Image (cartoon, rainbow, N blue to C red):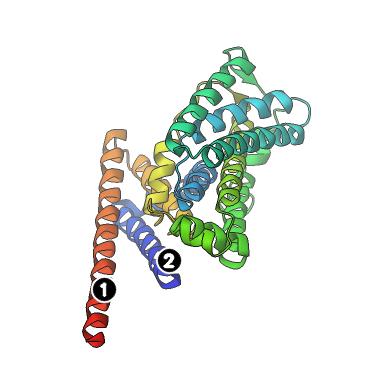
Amino acid sequence: MRTMLSNRIVRVYLLLLATVAILAVVDGNRILSESTVYAVMQQFATLGPVALALGLTILVRNFDLSVGGVVALSGCVAVIAGATNPWLGLLAALATGAAFGFVQGSLIVKLNLSSIGVTLGGLLTATGLAYVVTGNREIALPLRDIPALLDQPLWGPLSLRCFVAVVLFAIAALAISLTRPGRDLLASGSDPKAAMVAGVRVGTVVTATFVIAGMCSAIGGALLSFSLAAASPTPLSNPLVPAAAAAIIGGVSFRGGRGHPIGIAGGVLVLAVLQSGLTALGVDPFVQDVVTGAVLLIVGLLDGLDFRRRSNDVQRRFHLGAFRAR
């Protein structure tokens, strides 16, 4: 398992290096400029928490469609509750995301429901509540110094908002690699029945994962709204598709139990480099979509070949064992 995870992580970062190299060959002055690198890291700050949230639910063999709605609702709640104190807004957003995650996870576990249906309802509910709490209008943040605080470069190209995203990935990576709950999460996604036999409380793990995913989405939505100094019930874009793409590129398997936050972070960086780099080159948005789709296709083919190779290895071992038994 560890070898397979390390291979997936190495693959995504080799893909990242290849992407940077190809774009740099086209126009190194633009691609390697400070403004482009800063834009890449800001994209990472925006997409990273949402991709991490979605990736964690995929690791436990589920799929959270509600991340886009939770991002929008949490951003609105953060701006409204944080009108005088941003910390109050952030806490309110975290509570909102945790509540959504807990309700959805509990319904999935207790009623044995499909995560697709439950989280689709969560998406629609969160989107509707965003319109309710804002009165279907844009809400401005009175604290005008917050955007500059969050987005100004502090550590090279890293802003405070980007640093928060990096910390989230670091915590998730350490938890999955070094702690018992992290191992239980991977076991629950890899083989739920075997995990239950081994004493893992799979239902609790799934619910807790959805709570954490809701909080990650809430952090992303709150910080984005603070960065824009405004919140709107209509999101600027739906983060679900790029978040899913980043998770897939990062090596997360929809079969569950395979993937790692470090790989997801690499997937986010690949998408951020593609988007920011192609934008710097003046490429049309539809061409960016085609290129991103091609990268996803390549990753999907590699996963398919890897799965076929593992299946053939298992079959060969089975036949060899049967032959020796004779």
Q: Residue 151: horizontal and vertical position, in percent?
A: 61, 41
Q: Residue at x 54, y 42 (%)?
A: 109
**Vertical side of 187 occupied by 293: above or below:** above
Position of 85 with respect to 98 (left or right) is right
Q: Which mark is residue 148?
A: none
In this orientation, which residue lies closer to the viewer: 311 or 85?
311
Residue beneath disc 1: 313
Type of the residue with mark 1:
Asp
Position of 14 with respect to 202 (left or right) is left
Viewport quadrant of the C terminus: bottom left
Outermost residue, front direction? 326
Type of the residue with mark 2:
Leu
Examine the image and state in which quarter residue 6 appears: bottom left
Q: Residue 272: horizontal and vertical position, in percent?
A: 43, 46
Q: How many marks?
A: 2
Q: Residue at x 49, y 24 (%)?
A: 124
Residue beneath disc 2: 5
Which is closer to the viewer, label 1 or label 2?
Answer: 1
Q: Residue at x 44, y 52 (%)?
A: 269
Quote the CA–CA distance across marks 1 and 2: 17 Å
Does dot 1 land on a helix, a strand or a loop? helix
Q: Residue 254: horizontal and vertical position, in percent?
A: 38, 50
In this orientation, which residue lies closer to the viewer: 291 or 243?
243
Neighbourhood count class around disc 2 (C-alpha, 10 Å): few under 14, some 14–19, many 20 upward: some
Does dot 2 land on a helix, a strand or a loop? helix
Neighbourhood count class around disc 1 (C-alpha, 10 Å): few under 14, some 14–19, many 20 upward: few
Examine the image and state in which quarter residue 99 appears: top right
Q: Is residue 173 visible?
A: no
Q: Residue at x 51, y 46 (%)?
A: 48
